[in-house]
Image (cartoon, rainbow, N blue to C red):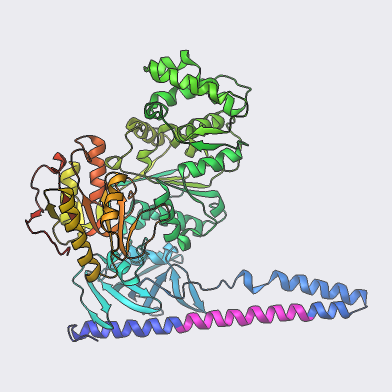
Amino acid sequence: MSHDLHAAAAQLIVDEEQRLDEICVGADAYNSERKQKLGAHKQKLREIEHERLASNNPREIDKLTEEIERLSQYDPAKYLIPFEEIATPYLAGIAIRDDDPAIGRKHILFGKQGLMLGNRVLVTDWRRAEISKLYYEWDEGEEYEEDIGERERSGVIEQKLAYGIVSRELRSLQRGRTAYEKRDGQWCDPQRSNVSALRKEQSGDHRMVDIVALISREQFGLITRNSDGCLYLTGGAGCGKTTVALHRLSYLVFNQPERFRPNRCLVVMFNRSLCNYVKKSSQELLTPELPVETFHSWALRALRGLDLKLRFVPTRDAGLTALKKSVAFFEALREYAARPADSSPLADLGAFYRDGALLRRHCDDPERLESLARQGERLLEPGCEAISFDDAGPLIHLAQLRRAGAEIPGALGWYDHVLIDEAQDLSLVELHALMDATTRRRSLTVCADERQKILEFVDAAGFSAFQLELQGSGLAAGELAISYRSTRPIMTLAAKVAGRALGEVVNDGAKPRLHHYDSQDVALDALRRAVGALLAREHHSLTAIICRFRQEAFVVHEALKGLPGVRLQTADLSFEPGILITTAHQVKGLEFTGVILWNPSERAYPVSEIGQNLLYVAITRACERLAVYHYQPLSPLFSGEQPGWRKTNETLYALR
């Protein structure tokens, strides 16, 4: 134990390490007892089966068969679930002093899975809101009053703790705003407020951290909100929209398994990188049966449900894509669907594309409509097996409109709940396709921030129209206003770039740093030296070098070749510590300990809505550190020297 800690803190840590040892012993005992009971049950069945096979008496055989059937109904494997959270048995805890003398003082632990040993509750599943609300809705020192088990309970929250446990070892402990960290076998006060980033570095795994202990009162209220209808979550970068949405879905599946079946729920993410990120980060949260898709990977599934075996090919005409993703195009599609049709879905879409008279009433772009008509002719050709990516939404939604009221696996009236992330970058027709894929209860969670829309070809009016439609059917909205990811200096810069007010920020930290050089070669040399120093100093952090263009990423990667841990981002995202070279479009929804923006010039981030949004997204990927390396004039979006910037003429920087 470090001498830097005062006596009370040292005793708290000793007590909690002992508590962890006791819980680990209990978890092992539970799994051992479970194994013994399952073994004894199987042995009993084998003995009866052997006795039945050896018998020649029909009555005895019938009696033994009935006994086998009876025992099979009470198979302990059905109710003795293995405790799988062995490495991290719990994540949060409270010490209460209840006014009922029968309860008195009690320490309650919360984790991703409940654990009982005999009649004793060792760990409570955080999704049991009746109990866990004591942790999420009350602060240390507050007097609580809650209905628990149909009885009114009152008392005092004496302690509220967040645990960082790695491989059965207590690595960090947080009580209120005070945090302690174990480094090199010694406990100390790390002087860092970003608990999420701290835990990632401790484990060497930079996937989405378990936030069970970090969920705020505001977030818990949204997670446990009424399950009917649509919940719309909005807020700035790093406020927890996606995390809250995923925990909400986990909460629904856990508490109402007959209503929210995992294989009939769906999570739709912005791109493959984010999709893989969530899959790898949230396996325990969502269960393996729950599909996590991009819009187009889901679309392939939906098309198979519609008996369409098609493949996607890239769209060559960006203007045509913009047309298909416009509100006017959606309105034309709905008008067309009101007419009867007896052709196949693909031929039906082709006929719509060729209906110039109808389309001209909605879309004033003769040149694009001619291109669309030619594409419609190709869809009508016999044996057509490929469609453009931007055809997926219109094709699925047209088929849904034609078969309204039906239930089609994966395509129509099928999903108990759909979670749509980054909804502002989906078109109106795509949003309707996903909504119509749900059952009549229309249970959805929609996450969006219109200031983070980065796809220029998607009509922004579409998402606004979708919101208005949802409001008419009982939309519940929740705005997350507190930023948990980035530090105050980083969010100050991001707010300035985005032209939005700076909200509440939890974490403080170092100011962003600006590095200007006379040429690309000089900038790359300086970057290589700085990255080398960073890798030598920090072995467990993950830093992203964010380029605007893919070709820039290749150039930077070549300049850093040979440095350990440096890699280009692919769809199969790695969460190991090191340096990840990527582009602004690829990092949507991700976060890193540090971010280096590479040459954010006016060409990279022009003074436009999309340029502004893209720069905001890039800046807010950083949890603790932000630096800029550039050799061309900065984008005017930075507006000259900003509050929180620190300029220097030095060539080499220690990225603190």
Quadrant in the rendering for residue 548? top left
* For residue 29, side relative to residue 361 (left or right): right
Compare residues 29 and 87 and report the one nearer the observer. 87
Q: Is residue 310 left or right of residue 585?
A: right
Identify the image quadrant of the C terminus.
Answer: bottom left
Residue appearing at x 37%, y 54% in the figure: 244
Up the image or down, 157 lies above or below 582; here it is below
Query: Which stretch appears magenta?
Result: 25-47
Q: Quadrant of residue 487?
A: bottom left
Tell me if I can see residue 273 in this picture: yes
For the stretch drawn in magenta, the main secondary structure is helix
| Residue 35 is a magenta residue | yes
Q: Is residue 500 among the parts visible in the rendering?
A: no
In front of the other: 555 or 68: 555
- Count of picture labels: 0
Is 235 rendered above or below residue 468? below
Q: Residue at x 47, y 61 (%)?
A: 283
* Residue 180 horizontal/vertical position (percent): 24, 76
Compared across the picture, whether 118 is left or right of 486 comes to right
Residue 555 x, y percent position in the rendering: 27, 50
Percent position of residue 83, x then y: 51, 73
Quadrant of the image containing the N terminus = bottom left
Task: Give yes or no for residue 493 being in the magenta stretch.
Answer: no
How far from the left and from the top, in percent, is residue 592? 29, 59
Q: In the image as oriented, which residue stretches furthest toward the top? A: 357
**Image quadrant in which you'd find residue 219:** bottom left
